[in-house]
Amino acid sequence: MKFAYRFSNLLGTVYRRGNLNFTPDGDCIISPVGNRVTVFDLKNNKSETLPLATRHNVTCVGLSPDGTLAILVDEEGAALLVSLISKSVIHQFHFQKPVHCVSFSPDARKFVITKDNVALMYHAPGKKREFNAFVLDKTYYGPYDETTCIDWTDDSKCLAVGSKDMSTWVFGAERWANLIYYSLGGHKDAIVACFFEANSLDLYTISQDGALCVWQCDTDLDGLKPMPPKDRAEDKNESVKDLGEEFIDEPKGEVIRGKATTDEQERREKVKYTRAAKYFFNKEGDFNNLTAAAYHKKTHLLVTGFASGIFHLHELPEFNLIHSLSISDQRIATVSINCTGDWIAFGCSGLGQLLVWEWQSESYVLKQQGHFNSMVSLSYSPDGQYLVTGGDDGKVKVWNTSSSFCFVTFTEHTSSISAVTFTSTGYVVLSASLDGTVRAFDLHRYRNFRTFTSPRPAQFSCLAVDSSGEIVSAGSQDSFDIFVWSMQSGRLLDVLSGHEGPISSLCFNPMKSVLASASWDKTVKLWDMFDSWRMKETLTINSDVLAVAFRPDGNELAVAALDGQITFWDHENAVQTGSIEGRHDLQMGRKELDKITAKQSAKAKSFTTLCYSADGQSILAGGLSKFVCIYHVKEQILMKKFEISCNLSLDAMEEYLDRRKMTEFGSMALIDEGAGDEDGVAIALPGVKRGDMSSRHFKPEIRVTCLRFSPTGRSWAATTTEGLLIYSLDCGLIFDPFELDIDITPSSVHKVLSQKEYTMAIVMAFRLNEKKLIQEVIETIPYKEVDVVCSSLPELYVEKVLEFVASALEKSHHLEFYLTWAQRLLMLHGQKLKTRSGKLLPIIQFLQKSIQRHFEDVSKLCEWNRYNIKYALAISKQRGMKRPAETSASEEELEESNSDYLMEEATMHS
């Protein structure tokens, strides 16, 4: 097995903090998620997390006007210049201090960042290669407090900068004779946003206390006069200081300093602003501050978000209220409008919500929310198409692995979820919780149709369901018992006693009626379901047992213990077949408040979750660490370590503490600076919904709570502090030929293909094992020759062709072509493949997943077409325009062809 797995996607978290950006076409939205960035395609209903990460949580994202470049800035001021086309990092830069806002100019030649009380203008990276992508052009001084927001005029001649000192400054991007800077007041609180009117210097400024000022300028954009070179030289030497501005040419760029007062004579010759109006938003309470705003210049639409979760839509400049709506009970952290002005995106960092609202139809385009607290468990559906996760917030969420969206959330549990799983049918989700219930959810009707409880209240810590889906078992952590229920009747069948400590893990043998239970009493017990749940065997372990897992063929049992060892057992004979010492592979980090080193603390750490790969040759292990280890079971060696995160905003990430944060009184981490919602996760006082003046914060600790391999063998998933991470098999990373000969080259394959020796061409392409070449060869073969080629394929290559067809079917548009390949391969070689069903099961499940997804898409399309035709016929009959008999006959033929096509796919699926 080749471990060419790479990070593929991030689920479970849709928004953390920072600003949202729509792409120029308005179809996608870019959302910062921790130290990563996710792109949500709203048109095609898909999402993708870019395969890059910053060292801390991303706080602001700047998008170029053409949508090809993005600047990601983290909490510490470190920036990444990212290409959204190649999805790679082009350049790295450090601004040395936290950045509040990033904005490209509309002509894409400059970009401005705000930090401290200054605004810095840089030359924007161009399309040509540059040694240094970030070249400082100008530095703007003026505000006395932190700068908060930026906006540009449409022609990129001027920019406005808002500040916490209640002032807004208008600066010239170039040297204008009549506008170098202009200071605007009129507010009594920090400026949240400022916006120029379209093709004008007129300005809107919005403050945190809900005040809107409308500023009119006496000069048009065309009225800005360039400063003559002679005046520039004079200004540099003497007159600039008299005017209150100062230009200093330095290697780091030009410095522009503004003052709040100038001479009256100079005011007459320069641009002048007057306040035309001042409006106030309706406030419902002292804590209902205005927190975010966005303005669409073409439609004059102003959107404002408040701390109470309410947002307003106003039409400017008349300030007419279009509508007001509450979308959350949490603070709206960011607002964005797409290019057409139809869709409005809201981000709520408190609960991690991302909402896209179409205001004209008053409907949601996107409504996603991750788990509020950490995710603790996950499970794949049998076909690998869905994922279910359970979290400490008591919610059970089901995710589509193709679109990466959550499509249903169950909220019936009243306490933390401890375990989730699918039944063998894939249409029932089971969840165990600390509230003392095990619930079964129907994915057809999206309802809780069974609730299993114990005679006495018990907190369930683990869950297992047998291969038939009829027997459900859950382990208790307080009564040390295992409860067994019937899925059909919901009755309690038995209570298995015998453990002397909390039950930590349960697992059914996939091939036999045997249940393995692990406990903190240093034993693993095996229970025989068909023998009245008699205790079949007891395996004694050297330490407390934390996790158990059966191999997919049911012939081996893996056990993870508190001493860091993974032991393998032949459970039929109660014989240990091997062990892995994995404590040193965890490579623990040191938390900020730890009194001992990471090396010492690692001696007490262990693996808390285990999972076999789909073929059973390897095992995944993870725990309280940022690493996930893959071991080869037979050789008992470490094959690869995956670092799941490099986010230093999480605790226990570094092996050594930063001595610069240590003082004679202890670590600086003990001091809570009270930075509001900006740092860490806010902990409110019990019972306080809003306005908690004593808010505290903590840094979440990095950990892996659950690992699962996809039944298709193409990916594996991990629930972590960062979210639900998916690692997929990347075929493009490794050149892995099969029985390669010196005569097998791409040119020789093309030569054989041109001679119409199709079987030989396929064999040669698979021996070279290049995906693009294999695809070219298979798609060149005529449709009528597929049957002949499939029948003449060597047995060794049937499995390889079937696996390629399954992967191609997932993304290719040649649906009928690849369905024909799959059908002929299974029909002609089905009996021989059945003898190796255990080894081929991941490939068959992968093929089933691809066919099922296409089946659902095509069936919806056919139903929609049939509905439209029936609707058109009904309308024509109402109008008295009766169609001739030929038309109705053709309609029946169309329906028959649709039903035949669906029946063919259903046959393939079965």
Image (cartoon, rainbow, N blue to C red):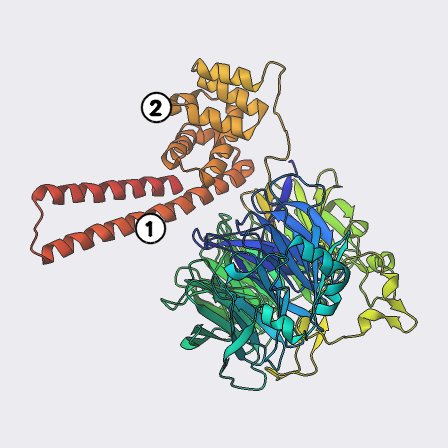
Between 548 and 251, the one lying in front of the other is 251
Q: Amino acid at mark 1?
A: Lys
- Left or right of 618 in this view: 902: left
x and y, in percent, of residue 79 in the image: 69, 54
Q: Would you say the residues marked 1 and 2 are in contact, meaning their CB atoms lie under 8 Å apart?
A: no
User: Quick check: 817 above or below 544?
Assistant: above
x and y, in percent, of residue 167 in the image: 63, 75
Badge 1 element: helix
Residue position marked by numbered label 1 in the rendering = 860
Task: Please state, as top left, top right, bottom left or bottom right, where the N terminus lies in the image.
Answer: top right
Q: Amino acid at mark 2?
A: Lys
- Left or right of 524 in this view: 495: left
- Left or right of 193 in this view: 501: right
Q: How many marks?
A: 2
Residue 878 visible somewhere in the drawing: yes
Mark 1 or mark 2, earlier in chain: 2
Task: Please state, as top left, top right, bottom left or bottom right, where the C terminus lies in the image.
Answer: top left
Between 415 and 268, the one lying in front of the other is 268
Residue position marked by numbered label 2 in the rendering = 784
Badge 2 element: helix
Q: CA distance from mark 1 to mark 2?
A: 29 Å
